[in-house]
Image (cartoon, helix red, strand yellow):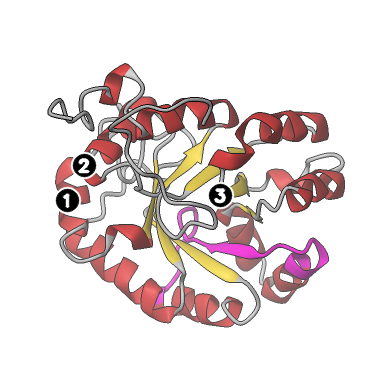
C-alpha cells in the first residue's frame, strides 16, 4: 500500500486459501489481459474464462501465457465441461486441460441434468489431474433448490475431492444464490453456512450490492467469484472498508 491507515482489515496473502477473488474473463484480448493484470495482479487469485468463451477466443494460447507469466492460475468455465460431457467427450476434455496447461477444472451441472453420483465421479477422476472446483446451483431461474439440498450437494462434492465449491449466480448475478432482481437469498446463504465452512465456498457475486452483502456477513476474507476485471480494485476497497458501502463496518472508533 502507498500509505498507512489505522483500523484496516488484515487481508490474507497470496497464495490464499480464503479471501480468494476469482475474476471473470468473458473474452479479453491479449492486450486487455495484460492491461487488466498491470493494475489488478495483486488482487486476483484465479481467472475463469467464462462458460465456453475459450472455444471462440482468438489468440487463446498467447492470452493464457500472459496469465502464466503473471503466476495467475486460470480455468475454463463449467459450461464448457458440460458441453463436452453432453457429447460424451470426457476424455477429450481431459486432453484439452493438458494441451492448454490448465491447472484447475470446474465441474458443474447448471445447464444439463446429471445424476449427482456421476458428477462426483467426474470430480474424483479430475482431482487426479488438476485442482477441482465444483459448482452447485442451476442456471435456470425457475429451478429453486432448497437449502438442505444445497448443503447436501456441497458436502458430497467436497467429500469427492473438490478443493472448493462455487455457489452459482451466473455472470449476471440473478439465479441460484440470488433472486431475479439480484437480491441475495439471505436465508439460503445463512443456512448453508451452518454446515459448510465459509472458506470452502466461493460465492459468485458479480454485482456490488452482492459483494457488500457477503463482506459484511463474513468479513474481508470471504471468497468471491465472477468479478469483472474492472471491478477488482473497487472490490478490494470494499473488502478494506475504504468505500462508502463498508466504510463504517470495520472502523473501530476507539482506536
Residue drawn at x 51%, y 28% as measured from the top left: 233
Q: In this view, does 62 lie to the left or right of 236?
A: right
For disc 3, the marked residue is 45
Q: Which of marks 2 and 1 is nearer the N terminus?
A: 1
**Badge 2 density bin: few <14, some 14–19, many ≥20, Cα 10 Å:** few
Q: What element carries label 3?
A: loop
Membership of 180 in magenta stretch: no
Q: Is mark 2 on a helix, strand or loop?
A: helix
Name which of mark 1 and mark 3 comes first in the sequence.
3
Q: Name the residue under label 1.
A: 190
Place of residue 21 in the rendered image (x, y in percent of width and height, measured from the top left): 48, 45
Instruction: Give the number of the disc on residue 207.
Output: none
In primary-sequence order, the first of circles 2 and 3 is: 3
Percent position (x, y) of residue 54? Answer: 73, 47
Q: Do the residues labelled 1 and 3 touch (CB within 8 Å)?
A: no
Q: Confirm or deny contact between disc 2 and disc 3 (CB under 8 A).
A: no
Q: Circle 2 sits on which residue? A: 217
x and y, in percent, of residue 232 in the image: 52, 32
| Image quarter (top left, top right, bottom left or bottom right) of the C terminus | top left
Question: On the picture, is 149 further left or further right than 106?
Answer: left
Amino acid at each position: 500500500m502507498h500509505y498507512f491507515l489505522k483500523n484496516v482489515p488484515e487481508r490474507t496473502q497470496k497464495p490464499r486459501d480464503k479471501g480468494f477473488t476469482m475474476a471473470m474473463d468473458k473474452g479479453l484480448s491479449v492486450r486487455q489481459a495484460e492491461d487488466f493484470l498491470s493494475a489488478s495482479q495483486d488482487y486476483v487469485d484465479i481467472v475463469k474464462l467464462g462458460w465456453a468463451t475459450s472455444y471462440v477466443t482468438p489468440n487463446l494460447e498467447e492470452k493464457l501465457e500472459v496469465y502464466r507469466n503473471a503466476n495467475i492460475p486460470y480455468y475454463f468455465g463449467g459450461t464448457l465441461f458440460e458441453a463436452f460431457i453432453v457429447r460424451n467427450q470426457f476424455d477429450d476434455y481431459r486432453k484439452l486441460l493438458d494441451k492448454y496447461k490448465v491447472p484447475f477444472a470446474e465441474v458443474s451441472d447448471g445447464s444439463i441434468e446429471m445424476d449427482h453420483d456421476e458428477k462426483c465421479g467426474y470430480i474424483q477422476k479430475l482431482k487426479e489431474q488438476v485442482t477441482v472446483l465444483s459448482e452447485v446451483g442451476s442456471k435456470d431461474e425457475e429451478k429453486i433448490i432448497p437449502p438442505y439440498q444445497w448443503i447436501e450437494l456441497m458436502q458430497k462434492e467436497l467429500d469427492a475431492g473438490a478443493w472448493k465449491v462455487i455457489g452459482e449466480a451466473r455472470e449476471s448475478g440473478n439465479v441460484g444464490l440470488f433472486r431475479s432482481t439480484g437480491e441475495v437469498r439471505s436465508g439460503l446463504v445463512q443456512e448453508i453456512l451452518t454446515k459448510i465452512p465459509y472458506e470452502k465456498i466461493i460465492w459468485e457475486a458479480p454485482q456490488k450490492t452482492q459483494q457488500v452483502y457477503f463482506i459484511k456477513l463474513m468479513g474481508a476474507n470471504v471468497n468471491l467469484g465472477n468479478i469483472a476485471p474492472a471491478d477488482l480494485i473497487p472490490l478490494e476497497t470494499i473488502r478494506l472498508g475504504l468505500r462508502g458501502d463498508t466504510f463504517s463496518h470495520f472502523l473501530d472508533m476507539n482506536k
